[in-house]
Amino acid sequence: MQKNKIKICYFGIYNPDFSRNKIYISGLRELGAEILECRDNSNGIVKYWNLWQKHKSIEHSYDAMIVGYPGHLVVPLAKLISNKKVIADLLGSLYDAEVHSHNPSFFKKIKTKIIDWLAVKFADIILLESHAQKEYFEQKFGKSEKYKVIYTGFDLADFSKLEANKVAKDKFIVLFRGRLTPESGITHILKAAEILKNENILFKIMGGGQLLEKTKAIISEMNLTKVMLLTDFLPQEKMLEEMARADLSLGQLEDNPRLNRTIPHKAFESLSLGIPYLSGDAPAIREIIKEGETGFFTPLANPESLAQKIKFLSQKPEILAEVSKNSKEMFYEHFTPEILAQNILDLLNEFS
């Protein structure tokens, strides 16, 4: 890939350490783009004033603006103060996330609907995480050339030369890493663990969240001695080492409409490490994974089918080895920071 001397203002209230922002920024810098960060996370309306003031010092110094994720709230401001193309990395819909994950009030539903609508109206280009998200936006806000799919990927620098640990173990390790939320399907995982309690299979659950106490209670009530719950914070390196010991990585498993459109970050982590990924069968994840070639699927919200699939795969090391190889090759072909950043630069050239 050729180095690019373009100057990009990365704008908004985004967290630079959040995976999607970090991946895009590092990829763009690797390709030679100069990133001018204009960021503020003050409370209330103060953030708008601060962003406006910070932007004044660089307003004539860049070629394009990217509003980092989450940035739905500040897209109108970005468009009003910049005379350049505004690329809004929305990832998905705020309204969608609130309704299907947080049980919001009527007021919150109306508020997030308005925020979504304004972000779509003011942005020149909208980056979304999947084609399923693009279809959702077309249904909600009408068809538009604005919607562009850029996958999230994974920052290879986070694990350097770390690889999946293929050293022989006394148990087949199944890993779930992520927030213990209703859409995660954690209760289905625990039910599958109960079904497989007499098998030589260890379930390792890494995470916390609103269902943590319920998860602990179920583990205790069912006496799930082959479920290991890790809730302590782990540095990135240690967390990835734990991942690398797994034989199988579990994705989202609940039957939740929002999951039809999202691709969890851990899917890209698993692909990059060559850890076979088993997900609930939903449209978005099918965009990057093919059954039996680069990963596996199981019916959503179905612990019996999940248990059956895990048991089958635990007895098929040759299939897992082939999927591990294929998934890692696919990651390096499509989802590295540099490849994703080049996709963004191509969009900028297209709309320049």
Image (cartoon, grey):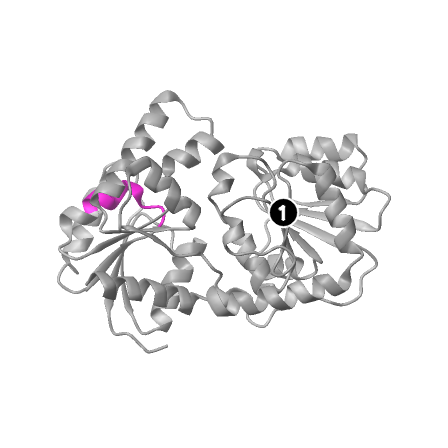
Of residues 236 and 271, the one drawn nearer to the viewer in this rendering? 271
- The local secondary structure at tag 1 comes to loop
Three-letter residue code for mark 1 = Asp
Of residues 260 and 87, the one drawn nearer to the viewer in this rendering? 260
> Please, which residue is most extreme toward the right here?
198
x, y percent for residue 136:
38, 40
Of residues 169 and 295, the one drawn nearer to the viewer in this rendering? 295
Is 167 covered by the magenta stretch? no
x, y percent for residue 351:
21, 60
> Please, which residue is most extreme toward the bottom here?
2
Q: Residue at 75%, 65% (x, y): give it.
A: 318
Is residue 187 in view?
Answer: yes
Residue occupied by mark 1: 232
**What kind of secondary structure does the magenta stretch mostly adopt?**
helix
Q: Which residues are magenta?
A: 69-77
- Where is residue 218, by image quadrant? top right
Quarter of the image with the C terminus is bottom left
Left/right placement of residue 190 relative to residue 254 reads right
Of residues 215 and 97, the one drawn nearer to the viewer in this rendering? 97
Is residue 164 in view?
Answer: no
- Where is residue 96, by image quadrant? top left
Q: Residue at 16%, 65% (x, y): give it.
A: 61
10 Å crowding of disc 1: few (<14), some (14-19), many (20+): few
x, y percent for residue 246:
70, 57
Quarter of the image with the N terminus is bottom left
Left/right placement of residue 348 relative to residue 247 reads left
Count of all numbered marks drawn on residues in the image: 1
x, y percent for residue 168:
80, 65
